[in-house]
Amino acid sequence: MNSSRRSFFKKSLMALAALPLIKSTEVLAEVACPQAAPKDAKALKKLLEADSSTGKRLDYVANAADSKNKKYKKGDNCAGCNFYADKKEVENYAPCSMAANRYVASCGWCKSFRAKK
Ligand code: SF4
């Protein structure tokens, strides 16, 4: 094996070894908005609807970019909110303590948004 082939294989093996180091959250961070409804039965049953009383009180939208609220800042969404329960996330939906633990879309937003610290 000549040195350029050996070098190629060595670099390829190093690249393959580095793949597991990419965090799955970084890969999953790209969520297409608006999101499809969750397939998970629990998340679907407890989904926060924008036109529900809680949804209206919070001025919630399932797609942050659709918000007309003057407090909304481009780039903010539920996934970046302190009240979004990351550990219980299912299909990019998670319970929100400000919305009576209803499941909100990671792409969503409401006027109670508070950026994660
Ligand atoms: S409080 Fe945060 S997580 Fe809950 S709906 Fe509002 S922006 Fe989304």
Image: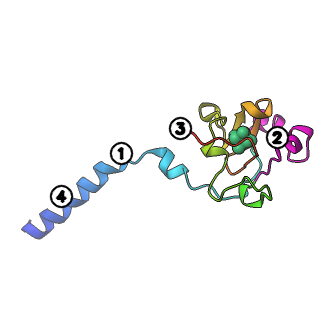
Q: In the image shown, does 82 or 17 lie closer to the viewer?
A: 82
Q: In the image shown, does 32 or 114 lie closer to the viewer?
A: 114
Mark 4: secondary structure? helix
Q: Report the residue marked by disc 3.
A: 117
Residue 21 - label: 1
Q: Is mark 2 within 8 Å of ligand 1?
A: yes
Q: Report the residue marked by disc 2.
A: 48
2 vs 3, front mark: 3
Q: Position of residue 49 (x, y in %)?
A: 85, 44
Q: Position of residue 19 (x, y in %)?
A: 35, 50
Q: Disc 1 residue type? A: Leu
Label 2 vs 3, first from the N-terminus: 2
Q: In the image shown, does 64 or 31 lie closer to the viewer?
A: 64
**Residue bounds of the magenta highlight:** 40-62
Mark 2: secondary structure? loop
Q: Disc 3 residue type? A: Lys
Label 3 vs 1, first from the N-terminus: 1
The residue shown at (79%, 34%) is 99
Label 2 vs 4, first from the N-terminus: 4
